Image (cartoon, grey):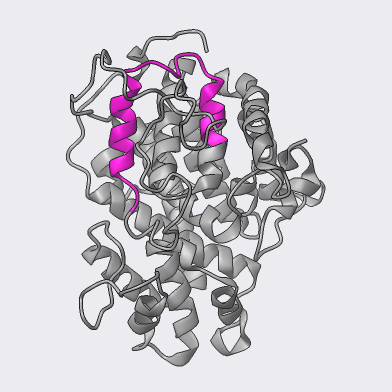
Amino acid sequence: MLALATARGVLAQVRHVSPVPPRAAHGLVARVYAQLVRDFGMAAPPVLLHSPAPEVLAACWVMLRESLLCGGASERVVKEVVASEVSAANACPYCVDVHRATLRGLPGHDDPRLASVAAWARTLGGGGVAAGRPHAPDAGRPPVLDAGRPHAPDAGRPPVLDAGRPHAPDAGRPFAPDASLVAVAVTFHYLNRMVAVFLGDSPLPPELPRRARGPALRLFGRIMSPAARRTPPPGLSLPLLPAAPAPPDLLAWTGTGRLADAFARASAAIERAGQRSVPAPVRELVTERLAAWDGGPPVMPSDGGPPAGPPSRAWATEAAAGLPPDQRPAATLALLTALAPYQVGDGTIAACRSTRSGGHDDRALIELTAWASLSAARRVADRLPALTPVNVSSVERTDP
């Protein structure tokens, strides 16, 4: 019923590149696919799309597995709230559909104390990432939705929880995340960008009638529920990538231990990918723009203000204008991916594939966009205040 249910449907969702079919996978790609199906419950397109670049595929999986999947059921529900709400703030309807549906299948998903988690996660997204989707699903909506309101927007789409309940015990109290939740947020800032470039708006078939979306997503949540309630052993993905030292910006929020090890390995792999496929002047330009980024929409370098009218790629084109002509397409794609991924279009990809700009193949496209996406996600973490330990497993476990 869902396109996700068949290998053909999964592969067909990916655009701009051709992922490795599961039956053709070997080596590192096959090892990642096996862990993905075993631990996540399905061959998820947001992970599979990375397969033209095997090391980046492994890095994506290491971050996702060790941040989102490892932990008990009560902890998983809190992490799914973070995944859902970061994705909503970043205007990534594909990830919103997947993770809200998964969330509804977990015990404790309606605990009112999760409202503060949702509010915190929403503050980390939006801005430039959503700039290319002025009418994106969930745009302008509250972070959570009262499922009991028959007139609620998007009725039939599983909500996260009811933030409007006046008796919510944590209402108005600031939420203090721990490293595990920041890791989920960073992972989804990365994934939201990659999904925006390489996938469509929903895991559901585009021809599915709107009235059937709600039932289809509820079915998807039930399909995902058994895997989401399992607790995979932590650390099993780490051997997919060589050990690496953790950069200072990661240590600031991962601390030491498994998460630090996982993100150090993944970031080193994606940094190597960037060195292969992103020219040094392009990396310098993107790094400079991200250092000055305050989380808001991208601005025109010439006047310091956002362009008037509908979102435009002109800011990225102008920012790249000082580079040699053969590097400008890569710079434009990298800037858009980092700061406004929904502005990436077919022409942006075609320009990068042109032999006049280095002829980026599938692997190079994945490596370039992965480097830009993780650079932006790490910049989001840089802006966070110092972490205070919090026991995310203390949320009540209730029947779904």
Q: Residue at x 66, y 48 (%)?
A: 28
Visible residue check, residue 273: no
Magenta-colored span:
98-126
Measured as percent of width and height from the top left, residue 186 is found at 38, 45
**Magenta span includes 120:** yes
- Residue at the far front in the pictured view: 151
Q: Is residue 48 magenta?
A: no
Q: Inspect this view and state whether residue 128 appears.
A: yes
In the picture, measured across the screen, residue 133 lies left or right of residue 39, that is: left
Q: Where, by quadrant of the figure, is residue 209 drawn?
A: top right
- Closer to the camera, 130 or 40? 130
Where residue 302 appears, x then y in whole percent? 24, 83
Nearest to the observer: residue 175 or residue 190: 175
Left or right of 107? Residue 3 is right
- Taking the spot 43% from the left edge, 17% from the top edge, the residue there is 110
What's the residue at 39%, 69% (across, down)? Answer: 311
- Identify which residue, 300 or 332, lies in the foreground: 300
Q: Is residue 301 left or right of residue 183?
A: left
In this view, 367 is above or below 104 = below
Q: Name the residue located 51 percent from the left edge and 32 percent from the top edge.
A: 100
